[in-house]
Amino acid sequence: MLCFAGKALKALTYLRAGLLLHAITLLEIVILAKAGPGCFPDAEDSWPQIVCKGILLVFLASLPVLSQLDARCRYQNYKRVGDQLRRRGFDPRILRPLMKSRCQRDAAGLAARKSGHGKACRAFFRSCGYRWYHVLPDFLFTRPSFLLSRHFWKSTFFLKAYRR
């Protein structure tokens, strides 16, 4: 019974660390379910229509997968930041690398709250100019080409698992 409670708590923490990403995944699945039937090629479609519908279907189907890969990486951030805050106490240098996106700030905030540094974390992000409505990552405004870089894909979707 204790093992089940531990796994349930871990699953709940995973969901809370990437709450926005899980909500986005659900929204994307609803959109895919609504738009999906129209995306499948019909017998009377021409080849260009079939190709366009296929590309659209692959794009729509990949969005929930990418959101969940991102959520997994935010959970890794949560575990790493939580351990660092428990070991070293609050230090803005721990949080500074996670200011790039709302999802990273949410994961860091959850780790800070669980380690007793929630108010200091909120104050730090607020002092840096971030508010609840700053959802899009900073690099979209400063360097949009970063989306195509290997570092972005590796750090956003394929972060290595953090071992405590």
Image (cartoon, rainbow, N blue to C red):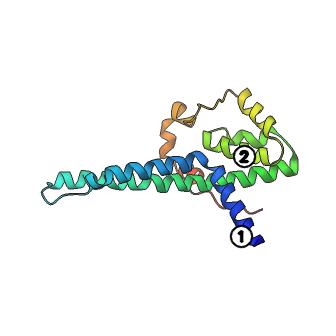
Q: Residue 130 at x, y = what percent?
A: 66, 30
In the image, what residue occupies the spot 72% across and 33% down? 125
In the image, what residue occupies the spot 53% across and 47% down? 23
Q: Which amino acid does label 2 sit on?
A: Leu
Q: Depth check: 122 or 141 in front?
A: 122
Q: In this view, does 151 lie to the left or right of 42?
A: right
Is disc 1 placed on a helix, strand or loop? helix
Q: Image quarter for residue 142?
A: top right
Q: Depth check: 21 or 130 in front?
A: 21
Query: Where is mark 1, residue-wise?
Result: 4
Q: Image quarter for residue 135?
A: top right
Q: How crowded is mark 2: few (under 14 residues within 10 Å), some or many (20 or more)?
A: many
Judge whether residue 51 can be spotted in this image: yes
Q: Residue 87 at x, y = what percent?
A: 87, 52
Quarter that holds the C terminus:
bottom right
Query: Where is mark 2, residue-wise?
Result: 110
Q: How crowded is mark 1: few (under 14 residues within 10 Å), some or many (20 or more)?
A: few
| Structural distance between the alpha carbons of marks 2 and 1 | 22 Å
Q: Is residue 38 left or right of residue 23?
A: left
Q: Which of marks 2 and 1 is nearer the N terminus?
A: 1
Q: Residue 41 at x, y = what percent?
A: 22, 57
